[in-house]
Image: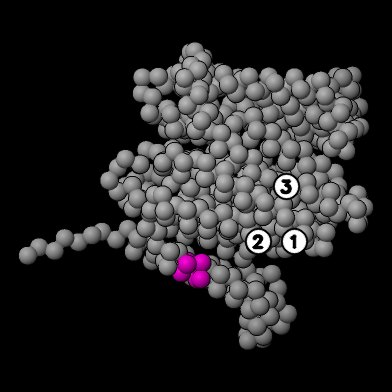
């Protein structure tokens, strides 16, 4: 019980930083959806999808390798840090150099030939973010969750500040003829979407400055022997990461290229923008999964050699599913309110994808839990195999169904991919590092949660109102009924938690 409390305590700390950072960042979504029409917002989504791919490529799985070798190399921990950091520094320099040389050609290939500067911005963002990976991993490894949270939060504050400065304050000052000479020097009205990227670049620069003391304190020499060991361990993680990014972002890019031939660029970019914006309404689930992963990954390795490790891993999965389903129900029960975060009604047609994306993230979190077996046994090649399998499903499903069903198919592909990855990992794990997961109990959680959700769909909108002669159901009717259902699930959670952590009574004879 104590170690599970420790895990979820760290999840809360990492979660606080992630929640605060993501919520603050999420507050930019209303701004973007007001300032940009869906086709313009689609550009943001597309560019960040490319950036995610190159971040995974540049990082080469070194974060996970760092966690694996930092504990095992007791006398050479600074060398582990230095080796991983210097390797990522070289990758960052290489990516930046390529971008500066080939920015025009790359921009033409991705159909943004009028804005080659986007390539420069993102190359620099990726490079700076690569340099922050190992210092942030060090903070996590040493359980410096508060410092980790503070730096992450500062990053987001600066990102938001410069977004507001460039997108709202500068145009307002020019319109009112205030500080025109100064503002004209730093602001170009034609570069509106570009200022989102510039704000990110400034924030990433400040983050590296804040992390510099940790870098300076731990940097030593590059050890080729350690590097070979780390690279041998991490290359399958690289393949898995690239495949994961395909699973996570390919749908957004494929919407553009698969819908263009049939419906034209305008419709394709519109759907891409709507899908990307509504995808973000699953933020509560994404925050929980991300915070849990931050805490769980080092926790897996710390518990590995302890006698009750397998039992702890099993309890972790049960607790994760219980709380993830609570977030799922919260979002779907109050989606009519949550969707108002996006004030522009042009985007609201895409709200239908939210339950699908929420469930996809639950399966992703389950996969993170089930991945413990190949991480602690050094069989990371299975991460690559499983992720490649998932990526193939994502691409094939999207290619087959996006032309006909648009972004609905994209959401379903993501959900199907993570579900199959979780099942595959569970099946393989039983043969290599068997953990007795309480599958029947977990399935009962899904049964209860999905039953409440399915009840809410027809009953909250029609039947309950008819029973009580309320007439046409209103938002208030729906909220009241859904709140009752949500309270039922919270009571269920409490009863299950009590059962999971029920103390063992010793019988005396």
N-terminal label among 1 and 2: 2
Quarter holding residue 77: top left
Residue 356 is tagged as 2
Q: Is residue 8 above or below residue 186?
A: below
In the image, the segment drawn in magenta is 443-448
Q: Where does label 1 land, which residue?
A: 408
User: Does residue 37 lie above or below 353 as drawn?
Assistant: above
Q: Can you tell which of label 2 and label 3 is closer to the viewer?
A: 3
Looking at the image, which residue is at 40% across and 59% down?
437
What's the CA distance linking mark 3 and mark 1?
14 Å
Secondary-structure class at tag 3:
helix
**Magenta region includes residue 445:** yes
Instruction: Pick whichever, 319 or 433, lies toward us.
Output: 433
> Which residue is at the front of the view, 142 or 466?
142
Labelled pair 2, 3 in contact (Cβ < 8 Å):
no
In 3D space, how far apart are the residues under numbered discs 1 and 2 (Cα atoms)?
A: 9 Å
Q: Main secondary structure of the magenta part?
A: helix
Whether residues under marks 1 and 2 lie with C-beta atoms below 8 angstroms apart, the answer is yes
- Can residue 130 be seen by looking at this rendering? yes
Residue 187 at x, y percent in the picture:
85, 25
Q: Residues within 10 Å of mark 1 (few under 14, many from 20)?
A: some
Q: How is the image coloured?
A: one colour
Q: Nearer the viewer, mark 3 or mark 1?
A: 3
- Of the numbered discs in the image, which one, if any, rests on residue 250? 3
| Mark 3 or mark 1, earlier in chain | 3
Residue displayed at 29% across by 61% down: 502
Q: Position of residue 236 (x, y in %)?
A: 55, 38
């Amino acid at each position: 019980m104590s170690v599970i409390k420790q895990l979820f305590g760290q999840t809360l700390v990492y979660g606080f930083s992630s929640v605060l950072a993501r919520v603050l960042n999420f507050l930019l979504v209303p701004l973007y959806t007001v300032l940009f029409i869906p086709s313009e917002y689609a550009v943001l989504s597309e560019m960040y999808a490319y950036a995610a791919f190159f971040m995974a490529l540049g990082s080469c799985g070194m974060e996970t390798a760092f966690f694996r070798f930092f504990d095992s190399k007791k006398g050479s921990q600074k060398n582990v840090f230095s080796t991983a950091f210097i390797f990522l520094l070289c990758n960052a320099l290489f990516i930046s150099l390529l971008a500066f040389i080939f920015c025009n050609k790359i921009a033409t290939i991705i159909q943004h030939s009028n804005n080659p500067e986007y390539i420069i911005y993102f190359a620099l963002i990726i490079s700076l973010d690569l340099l922050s990976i190992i210092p942030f991993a060090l903070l996590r490894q040493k359980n410096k969750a508060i410092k980790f949270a503070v730096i992450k939060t500062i990053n987001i504050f600066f990102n938001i500040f410069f977004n507001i400065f460039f997108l709202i304050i500068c145009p307002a000052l020019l319109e009112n003829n205030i500080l025109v000479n100064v503002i004209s020097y730093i602001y170009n009205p034609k570069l509106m979407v570009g200022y989102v990227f510039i704000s990110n670049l400034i924030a990433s620069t400040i983050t590296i400055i804040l992390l510099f003391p940790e870098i300076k304190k731990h940097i030593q020499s590059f050890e080729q022997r350690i590097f070979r060991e780390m690279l041998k361990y991490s290359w399958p993680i690289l393949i898995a990461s690239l495949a994961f990014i395909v699973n996570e972002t390919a749908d957004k890019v494929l919407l553009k290229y698969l819908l263009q031939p049939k419906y034209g660029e305008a419709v394709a970019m519109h759907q891409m923008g709507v899908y990307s914006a509504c995808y973000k309404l699953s933020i509560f689930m994404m925050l929980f999964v991300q915070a849990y992963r931050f805490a769980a990954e080092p926790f897996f390795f710390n518990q590995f050699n302890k006698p009750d490790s397998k039992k702890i891993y099993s309890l972790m999965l049960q607790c994760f599913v219980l709380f993830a389903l609570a977030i799922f129900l919260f979002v779907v029960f109050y989606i009519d309110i949550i969707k108002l975060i996006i004030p522009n009604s042009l985007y609201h047609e895409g709200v239908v994808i939210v339950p699908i994306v929420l469930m996809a993230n639950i399966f992703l979190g389950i996969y993170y839990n089930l991945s413990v077996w190949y991480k602690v046994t050094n069989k990371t090649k299975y991460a690559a195999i499983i992720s490649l399998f998932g990526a193939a499903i994502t691409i094939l499903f999207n290619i087959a169904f996006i032309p006909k069903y648009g972004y609905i198919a994209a959401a379903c592909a993501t959900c199907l991919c993570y579900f199959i990855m979780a099942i595959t990992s569970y099946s393989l794990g039983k043969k290599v590092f068997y953990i007795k997961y309480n599958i029947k109990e977990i399935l009962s959680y899904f049964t209860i949660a999905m039953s409440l959700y399915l009840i809410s769909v027809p009953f909250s909108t029609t039947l309950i109102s008819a029973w009580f002669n309320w007439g046409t159901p209103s938002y208030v009717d729906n909220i009241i009924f859904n709140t009752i259902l949500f309270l039922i699930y919270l009571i269920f959670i409490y009863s299950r938690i009590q059962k999971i952590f029920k103390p063992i009574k010793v019988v005396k004879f």
